Amino acid sequence: MSSSLSKKTAYLLIALTGIALDQLTKWEILAHFQEGERLNIIPSLFDLTLAYNPGAAFSFLADQGGWQKFFFLGLALVISAYLARAILRDEFRLSGKIGAAMIIGGALGNAIDRLIHGHVVDFLLFYWKDWSYPAFNVADSFICVGAVLLVLDGLFHKKQPKPTDEPTTDNP
C-alpha cells in the first residue's frame, strides 16, 4: 500500500468514526427515551432529550410534507461524493481534508437516519432560562466542526495553482 493511499485511509476512518459515534449515540437515545422526554444533565444548561427533525438545521423545511427527506438525502450524498473526490485529488490541505472527512461522516450519519426513520434523530439540548438552542446530534457536531476546518483551510492555506505543461507567451 502506498503512503499516499494509507494517508487517505485515515480520512475514511474519520468519516466512519463520525458515522459510528452518531449512530451508536442515537440507538442509545432511541432505546431509552420517548419523544419529548428530557433528562437533565447539567442544571439550567444541558439536557438529553429525544426530538425528531424531518428538516435540516434549525428544522429548516421541516413542515414541507415529506419531499424534503429525499432532497436532504440526495444533498448529503452529492456533498459527500464531492468532498471525497476532493480529498482523493488532494484539493485541500490537512485541516481541510480532516474537515471534509468530518462533514462526510456527519452528512452520512444523518442520511442513515432519513433512510431508516424518515427523519433525523436529535438529542443534545442546550438552554438557558427561556432560551434554548435547537436539539442536535453527533452528526451535526461533526458537520459544524468540519465546516470550520474547511473554512480555516480555505482562509489560511491558499493552494497554489498547479503549473501547466503548456508554455505561455506574453506577446499577442
Image: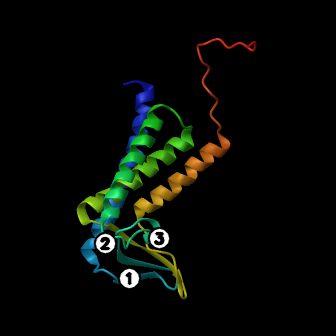
Q: Earlier in the sequence, mark 3 or mark 1?
A: 1
Label 3, label 2: how far apart the Cα atoms are = 20 Å
Q: Are marks 3 and 1 in contact (CB under 8 Å)?
A: no
Report helix, strand or loop for mark 1: strand
Residue 27 in the image: state x and y as whole percent. Answer: 27, 66
Q: Are marks 1 and 2 in contact (CB under 8 Å)?
A: no
Answer few, some or many: residues within 10 Å of disc 3's Cα (few below 14, many 20 plus, some between 14 and 19). Answer: few
Report helix, strand or loop for mark 3: helix
Answer few, some or many: residues within 10 Å of disc 1's Cα (few below 14, many 20 plus, some between 14 and 19). Answer: few
Residue 11 vs residue 36, the one in the foreground: 36
Relative side of 5 to 31, left or right? right
Q: Quadrant of residue 125?
A: bottom left
Q: Residue at x 60, y 44 (%)?
A: 153
Q: Earlier in the sequence, mark 3 or mark 2?
A: 2
Label 3, label 1: how far apart the Cα atoms are = 21 Å
Q: Badge 3 is on which residue? A: 58
- Examine the rendered structure and indicate whether residue 60 appears above or below residue 35: above
Residue placed furthest toward the bottom: 130
Label 1, label 2: how far apart the Cα atoms are = 11 Å
Residue placed furthest toward the front: 172
Q: Badge 1 is on which residue? A: 39
Residue 60 in the image: state x and y as whole percent. Answer: 44, 68
Report helix, strand or loop for mark 2: helix
Tally the numbered discs: 3
- Examine the rendered structure and indicate whether residue 103 appears above or below residue 125: above
Answer few, some or many: residues within 10 Å of disc 2's Cα (few below 14, many 20 plus, some between 14 and 19). Answer: some
Q: Badge 2 is on which residue? A: 29
Q: Earlier in the sequence, mark 1 or mark 2?
A: 2
